[in-house]
């Protein structure tokens, strides 16, 4: 009888162990499925902003984390510049752009993941927040180094309020694989957007180039048609620019162009478009601006240019003025003209207004109503 009882107890204990292993296997399978789904979401993100939004918001909710932070090495502000230019986002709670790699090397001296208790030092360095409740609630964490081509480019930090969720028994291959996918996605998004930005940017002034401006003009015309809001199109030409190059040299001419672009950026809205249209000529789009407002904004630009102390590359003062021509696109124009034709008419009309200003003494603003039958402007 004693032997039978012993066998029964042993069988019961074995069944309990099998049940525990079965539950662990089911949990691991669910975890793997969740990770695979997260990978697909990460890989489907088109822009850097979308990727960061998924990681810092949706991923946090999906895996029931109390805190998640992402550190990215950004010594030249390249990532920040991409986010500043994003149409959708430019700020993310939990994103920490690091100018110096030393912070990452201190955190990962062996470039290995850490899973375990979140002490005060880890909380202060990896989960900084103004919310004291969240800060204290991080009890365990997974700190994942992001590595590309043997270079430490950042860290993904996952924080949990469960002290047992992340510990030394956690299988590192799960989280290490996640870190590898995140690193690849981030690098690809940054590279893709940087190339796109370079292809649309004038290398000297860092304003839009002519091709990108033409595309933006088509988008703004369609927006005008959709919303009913007017749009101002402006062409600006620097007065007497050739003598600047002839007298002070092309390096000074280049500096004047760069400084002019900066003056325009400093005096216009983030939603306005600025392009170097050619030579010493700039093109500007002001969405939502009717005639009176557009004329006032353009006159303010002219005054700002007159009041700017432009200098050559050796610091020599150079007096600069500009002539500006304006026209307005209204919703009615979008119903009578095909988009490409309308864009050409806007440029030609603004160019004609600019030509009148230059012919009548320069350093002035001229407005001309949109002429849909205007021939090419003489030069």
Image: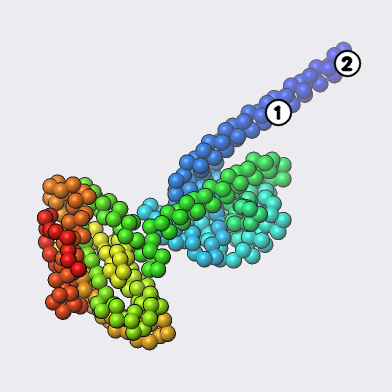
Query: x, y (%) of residue 344?
Result: 20, 55
Horizontal side, residue 7 vs residue 23: left or right: right
Which residue carries the number 1 mark? 21
Q: Nearer the viewer, residue 361 or 159?
A: 361
* Quadrant of the image occupied by residue 242: bottom left
The crowding category of the residue bearing disc 2, from other C-alpha atoms within 10 Å (few below 14, some 14 to 19, many at least 20), is: few
Cβ–Cβ under 8 Å for marks 1 and 2? no
* Residue 53 in sight from this viewpoint: no
Which residue carries the number 2 mark? 2
Query: x, y (%) of residue 219?
Result: 27, 51
Query: x, y (%) of residue 200?
Result: 38, 57
Residue at disc 2, secondary structure: helix
Give the colouring mode of the picture: rainbow
The crowding category of the residue bearing disc 1, from other C-alpha atoms within 10 Å (few below 14, some 14 to 19, many at least 20), is: few
* Residue 359 in sight from this viewpoint: yes
Q: Please give the label number shown on residue 235.
A: none
Q: Nearer the viewer, residue 214 or 279?
A: 279
Of pointers 1 and 2, the one earlier in the residue sequence:
2
Please name the residue shown 33% across and 56% down the image: 212
Q: Quadrant of the N terminus?
A: top right
Residue at disc 1, secondary structure: helix
Please name the residue shown 12% across and 50% down the image: 332
Query: x, y (%) of residue 147?
Result: 62, 52
| 26 over 185 or under it: above or below | above
Front tag of 1 and 2: 1
Horizontal side, residue 228 vs residue 218: left or right: left
* Quadrant of the image occupied by residue 74: bottom right
Please name the residue shown 60% across and 34% down the image: 32
* Quadrant of the image occupied by residue 259: bottom left
User: Mark 1 and mark 2: span between their CA atoms?
Assistant: 29 Å
């Amino acid at each position: 009888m004693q032997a039978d009882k012993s066998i029964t107890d042993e069988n019961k204990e074995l069944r309990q162990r099998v049940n525990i292993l079965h539950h662990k296997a089911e949990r691991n399978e669910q975890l793997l499925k969740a990770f695979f789904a997260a990978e697909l979401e990460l890989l489907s993100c088109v822009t850097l902003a979308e990727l960061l939004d998924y990681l810092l918001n949706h991923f946090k909710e999906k895996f029931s984390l109390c805190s998640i932070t992402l550190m990215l090495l950004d010594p030249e502000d390249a990532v920040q510049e991409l986010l500043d230019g994003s149409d959708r986002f430019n700020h993310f709670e939990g994103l920490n752009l690091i100018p110096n790699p030393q912070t990452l090397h201190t955190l990962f001296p062996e470039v290995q993941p850490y899973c375990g208790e979140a002490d005060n030092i880890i909380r202060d360095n990896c989960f900084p927040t103004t919310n004291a409740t969240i800060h204290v609630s991080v009890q365990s964490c997974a700190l994942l180094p992001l590595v590309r081509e043997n270079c430490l480019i950042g860290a993904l930090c996952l924080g949990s309020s469960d002290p047992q969720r992340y510990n030394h028994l956690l299988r590192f291959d799960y989280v290490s694989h996640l870190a590898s996918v995140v690193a690849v996605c981030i690098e690809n998004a940054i590279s893709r957007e940087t190339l796109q930005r370079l292809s649309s940017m004038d290398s000297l002034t860092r304003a839009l180039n002519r091709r990108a401006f033409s595309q933006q003009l088509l988008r703004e015309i369609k927006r005008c048609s959709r919303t009913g809001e007017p749009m101002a199109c402006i062409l600006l030409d620097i007065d007497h620019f050739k003598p600047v190059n002839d007298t002070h040299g092309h390096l000074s001419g280049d500096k004047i162009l760069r400084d002019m672009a900066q003056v325009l950026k400093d005096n216009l809205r983030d939603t306005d478009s600025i392009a170097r249209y050619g030579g010493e000529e700039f093109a500007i789009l002001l969405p939502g601006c009717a005639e009176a407002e557009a004329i006032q904004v353009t006159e303010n630009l002219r005054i700002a240019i007159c009041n700017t102390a432009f200098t050559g590359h050796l610091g020599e003062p150079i007096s600069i003025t500009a002539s500006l021509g304006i026209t307005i696109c209204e919703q009615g124009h979008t119903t009578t003209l095909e988009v490409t034709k309308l864009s050409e008419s806007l440029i030609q009309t603004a160019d004609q207004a600019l030509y009148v200003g230059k012919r009548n003494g320069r350093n002035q603003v001229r407005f001309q109503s949109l002429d849909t039958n205007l021939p090419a402007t003489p030069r």
